[in-house]
Image (tube, helix red, strand yellow):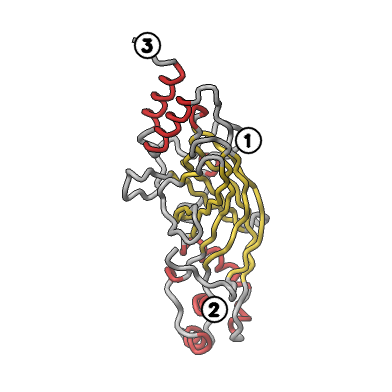
Amino acid sequence: MNRAPRSLLTLALAAALLAPLTSCDALLQIAETQANNPAVQPLMPTVEYSGTELVESPSKSMMARYYCPLVVPDVGLPGTASLACQAAFGAPPLASQMRVSFDLKFKVKNPNQFPIPVAELLAAVVVFPDKTNQSLGAACVAFCGTDQPGCTGQPGPGACVSKSTDIKSIADFQNAAAGFLIASGIQALAGQQPSFVMPQVVQDAEVLVTARFSFGAEALLQVLLQLAKQSAAQLQAGKALDFVIPYQIQGGVWLDVGSLGRVVVGYGPTSGVWTIPAEQLVPKRGR
């Protein structure tokens, strides 16, 4: 009986160990491809951060209706400010309606002759990075195979951990506020509903991967409340507000690359500015 080469046994063992964490079909396909081409060594994929797009925010009217009763002082009798605000802007919306969401976009290039799964994604966002009242949010997402229905993206032990000192791990953001950043899922095709199913980057191809995140309503609204207090006079005069929020984003993308194992490519830190609310922004639903 011929014994299987040690490299094939290693691949089979790796597939067995990683099966609970990743898509079984994808790992078996990687192992089969390398077994049929033992001289071909896997190549490192590349991940290019392509920017951040604000995709959902409240309107100016909603922001004014929400914050006016909170920051405009009463004149004389209690409740007069609330009545004046409602007369000027309308009834305040619920906090749950004040959602702010953004997309992180990446170009993932796979030079190999087998598909590679995107296994994990780490995003850390600081708003007002140059201020003393800056706020940090971080989220680690662990994607699931198609054989794991009901996956919510919740990471397990060891997720979003890098051995490289040059790439951030989730442990580097232990000071992040709980519930400040919430993952909504990932999409590899335009118009696709974001989900936590592991996206595949097909062989010898480049794919645009989009990850959507939202700010926890209560956490972000408390940050914006400080800006609203500075603009109380404008609200009292019946004027809507523009909130300009500088931000900084960084993190990493983990991929399963055959016998190379799980590799991570870092991105950022990169900075930008969001204007919230942006009147030209139409909330994107059903994606």
In front: label 1 or label 2: 1
User: Residue 119: which disc?
Assistant: none
Among numbered discs 2 and 3, the one appearing first in the sequence: 3
Q: Quadrant of the C terminus?
A: bottom left
| Cα distance between the residues tagged 2 and 3 | 76 Å
Q: Tell me the amino acid under the disc marked 1.
A: Asp
- The residue where tag 2 is placed is 64
Q: Quadrant of the N terminus?
A: top left
Residue 262 percent location from the top left of the image: 50, 33
- The residue where tag 3 is placed is 2
Q: Residues within 10 Å of mark 2 (few under 14, many from 20)?
A: many
Q: Tell me the amino acid under the disc marked 3.
A: Asn
Question: Looking at the picture, does residue 9 appear above or below residue 261?
Answer: above
Q: Residue at the spot x=49%, y=68% of the render? A: 284
In screen coordinates, is 179 left or right of 233?
A: left
From the viewer's side, name the closer residue of 7 and 279: 7
**Callout 2–callout 3 Cβ contact below 8 Å:** no
From the viewer's side, name the closer residue of 33 and 74: 33
- The residue where tag 1 is placed is 166
Q: Residues within 10 Å of mark 3 (few under 14, many from 20)?
A: few
Question: Looking at the picture, does residue 240 appear above or below residue 270?
Answer: below
In screen coordinates, is 102 left or right of 12?
A: right
Residue 102 percent location from the top left of the image: 54, 60
What secondary structure is marked by label 3? loop
| Cα distance between the residues tagged 3 and 1 | 44 Å
Q: Residue at the spot x=42%, y=38% of the render? A: 26
Q: Tell me the amino acid under the disc marked 2.
A: Ala
